[in-house]
Image (cartoon, helix red, strand yellow):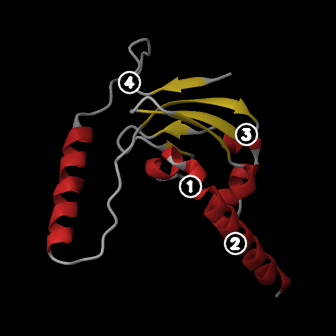
Amino acid sequence: MRVIRLGSKTSNDPQPSAAGPELKALLQENWARRLTDGSRFMVHPIHRVISFQIVAPYALRVQFDDHTEQTIEFQPILAGELYRPLRDLKVFNQVQIHREVHTLVWPNGADFDPATLHDWSDHVQDWVSKARQWESAATVTRGR
């Protein structure tokens, strides 16, 4: 099992930049500004991925800064231009934690909002539906 921990004291990696708290403050300021001018803007807590473990093919146990964790099976959603390349297990296993935005990222640019990962059970069915749509669209495109 491979374990990646962001900012681990046992790691030889540099600590994450101080931009994290500054970025959070900026986002909160922008939320407040947008909400006061009448814009529609969904506000949700900011979660950060702090570590993950590969627990099975296409499955990760993801730990968050609020001491919660999710075990996520990604295989059903690996579709479409961005996520289909992750079906190659060698590519999938290259997952890392982005040091500035604190979420899972892959070398091809695939990533997920950490809030989505944090509340995966609330979002998984939507993602599966999207993946089916992406596959249907790809089938139609290939059939032309």
Residue on which disc 4 sits: 7
* Residue at far right of view: 143
User: Please, what secondary structure does the residue beneath circle 2 have?
Assistant: helix
Identified by mark 4, the residue type is Gly
Instruction: Kindly identify the residue that appears in the image at 40 percent across and 39 percent down.
Output: 48
Q: Residues within 10 Å of mark 3 (few under 14, many from 20)?
A: few
Identified by mark 3, the residue type is Lys
Q: Tell which circle, 2 or 4, labels the residue nearer the N-terminal end.
A: 4
Looking at the image, residue 23 lies above or below residue 63 = below
Q: Tell which circle, 4 or 3, labels the residue nearer the N-terminal end.
A: 4
Report how far apart the C-alphas of labels 3 and 2 lie in the structure. Answer: 22 Å
Q: Position of residue 42 (x, y in %)?
A: 34, 66
Query: 48 or 109, which lies in front?
Result: 48
Identified by mark 2, the residue type is Trp
Give the number of the disc on residue 90.
Answer: 3
Q: Residues within 10 Å of mark 1 (few under 14, many from 20)?
A: few
Asked if residue 90 lies left or right of residue 2, the reply is right
Residue on which disc 2 sits: 134
Q: Tell which circle, 1 or 4, labels the residue nearer the N-terminal end.
A: 4
Instruction: Kindly identify the residue that appears in the image at 72 percent across and 42 percent down.
Output: 58
For the C terminus, give its image quadrant: bottom right
Identified by mark 1, the residue type is Asp
User: Please, what secondary structure does the residue beneath circle 4 have?
Assistant: loop
Report how far apart the C-alphas of labels 1 and 2 lie in the structure. Answer: 20 Å
Give the number of the disc on residue 40.
Answer: none
Q: Position of residue 74 (x, y in %)?
A: 68, 48
Query: 129 or 95, which lies in front?
Result: 129
Residue on which disc 1 sits: 122
Report how far apart the C-alphas of labels 2 and 4 lie in the structure. Answer: 36 Å
Q: Residues within 10 Å of mark 4 (few under 14, many from 20)?
A: some
